[in-house]
Amino acid sequence: MFEKRMIRKTHHMTAPGQTSSCCQHLKPSASLAGAASVIIGHPLDTVKVFGFFKGMSFPLASIAVYNSVVFGVFSNTQRFLSQHHCREPEASRSRTLSDLLLASMVAGVVSVGLGAPVDLIKIRLQMQTQPFREANLALKPRAVALGKQPIYQGPVHCIATIVRTEGLAGMYRGVGAMLLRDVPGYCLYFIPYVFLNDWITPEACTGPNPCAVWLAGGMAGAISWGTATPMDVVKSRLQADGVYLNKYKGVLDCISQSYQKEGLKVFFRGITVNAVRGFPMSAAMFLGYELSLQAIRGDHTVTNP
């Protein structure tokens, strides 16, 4: 009974492919939910660099594509695995968990390919809200001068500057740390949501329960962002590197230098902010996704493949 109920809810969330119109509904629902999560979470995200809404325009503009792809990849990967298991006599509970795990990992890898440039632009624009403190330490006068006025005039200028000075590879600065953050991060995002939502939702409910979706989504976000904090610190430092000076040679070098100078606690800096912002962001994301998907479907009936 538990397994059938969990699979039913999983398919409800992973709407693409269940009916002929579901793929058409996924993008707008993910887009609306993503925009809500960015607006809610961005101020807390930028507390780390005192920027509040600075740099929000670029992630907000790209959130439609980003969330549509990430949710679409997760949904369709899980659906593909589910269809494969349907050919077998009986799918076990552990096999369902493995499907969720694999689908989450694939979504995490794809998210890095799309999200690395977005995060880089956001970090670079946020860095301009304050002078880079270390830029005043034994640097050339030019670096100090750069710290007093913005280098980038906006997202487009930021992209052009990075490509011109660092090449196309510069747009993926910190991608290794982001992979180490997002692959396990999405596993701790989708899997807790599916299980918590299934556990909280009353048995009689046939559609998304707003309270259950909100609570499960928020808890999943807090868990995911809390545990991703160490790699988020490394990723942010690597992406901020190069604005005023170049300090790190890679992920390991960043970890080593950060540990030597600031100790182990540096990797947990901002964990409270991350967990706190993760709750409302993810609650808004999943609730907006589920409810907008239900509204866009109208009277469409969802059937398991």
Image (cartoon, rainbow, N blue to C red):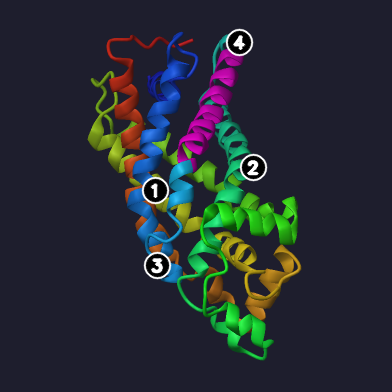
Provide residue 158's location: percent of width, then percent of height: 59, 58
The reply to whether discs 3 and 2 touch (Cβ–Cβ < 8 Å) is no
Q: Amino acid at mark 4?
A: Glu
* Magenta residue span: 62-85
Nearer the viewer's eye, disc 4 or disc 2?
A: 2
Q: Amino acid at mark 2?
A: Gly
Of the numbered discs 3 and 2, the one sitting upstream in the chain is: 3
In the image, what residue occupies the spot 64% across and 54% down? 160
Q: Nearer the viewer, residue 214 or 22?
A: 22
Q: In the shown orientation, is residue 241 left or right of residue 230?
A: right
Within the image, what quadrant is residue 256 found in? bottom right
| Label 4 to label 2: alpha-carbon separation | 34 Å
Residue 196 visible in the shown view: no
Dot 1 corresponds to which residue? 38
Of the numbered discs 1 and 4, the one sitting upstream in the chain is: 1
Q: Amino acid at mark 3?
A: Val
Q: Amino acid at mark 1?
A: Val
| Label 1 to label 4: alpha-carbon separation | 41 Å
Dot 2 corresponds to which residue? 113
Dot 4 corresponds to which residue? 88
SS at badge 2: helix
| Label 3 to label 2: alpha-carbon separation | 25 Å
Label 3 crowd (10 A; few <14 / some 14-19 / many >=20) = some
